């Protein structure tokens, strides 16, 4: 199976990248190119939506860590949402993501983004 990568700007400078299929040695370059394109701009938040990701390899894990590193370098929150059980199991074994970066749904992640923006405005 292949990998389909979608990217949308959920709010100005807050991006969501959706992955469908397999993120592995044969497909990781698609995500890499999308990350390069996103980070050519100002990024204030990055969310990976893994709702339709069926498989992830060690190369896929490296790409998720790269996304996290790019977000950190931009001082932007990074989060992963809608992780399938088999993908979550791989992340738990690898202990790859801090727990505060993983959300059960897009709505939960959006609430997190809302709180960050409200704090920045002093609300």
Image: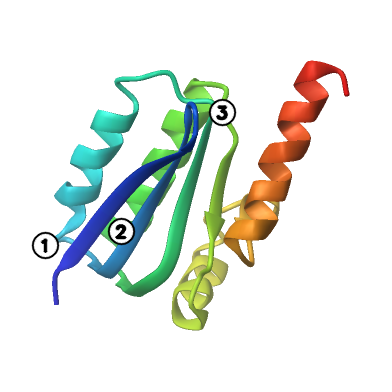
Question: Residue 34 lies in what quarter of the image?
Answer: top left
Disc 3: which residue: 76
Q: How many marks?
A: 3
- Locate residue 29, reporting x and y percent: 15, 48
Q: Which of the two labelled residues, at mark 1 and mark 2, occupies the earlier sequence position?
A: 1
Q: Secondary structure at mark 3?
A: loop
Q: Quadrant of the N terminus?
A: bottom left
- Locate residue 65, reporting x and y percent: 42, 45
Disc 1: which residue: 26
Task: Give me the C-alpha separation between circle 1 and circle 2.
Answer: 10 Å
Which disc is residue 60 wearing?
Answer: 2
- Locate residue 11, reporting x and y percent: 52, 35
Are the residues tagged 1 and 3 within 8 Å (C-beta)? no
**Which is closer to the viewer, label 1 or label 3?**
3
Q: Which of the two labelled residues, at mark 2 and mark 3, occupies the earlier sequence position?
A: 2
The furthest residue to the bottom = 86
**Observer-nearest residue: 110 or 85?**
110
In the image, is 107 to the left or to the right of 89? Answer: right
């Amino acid at each position: 199976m292949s990998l389909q990568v979608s990217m949308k700007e959920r709010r100005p400078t807050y991006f969501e990248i959706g992955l469908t299929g397999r993120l592995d040695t044969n497909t990781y370059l698609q995500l890499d190119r999308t990350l390069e394109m996103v980070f050519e701009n100002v990024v204030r938040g990055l969310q990976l939506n893994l709702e339709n990701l069926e498989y992830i390899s060690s190369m896929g894990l490296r790409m998720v860590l790269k996304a996290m590193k790019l977000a950190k370098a931009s001082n932007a929150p990074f989060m992963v949402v809608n992780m399938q059980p088999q993908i979550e199991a791989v992340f738990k074994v690898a202990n790859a993501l801090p727990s505060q970066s993983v959300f059960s749904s897009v709505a939960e992640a959006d609430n997190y983004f809302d709180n960050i923006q409200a704090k920045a405005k002093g609300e």
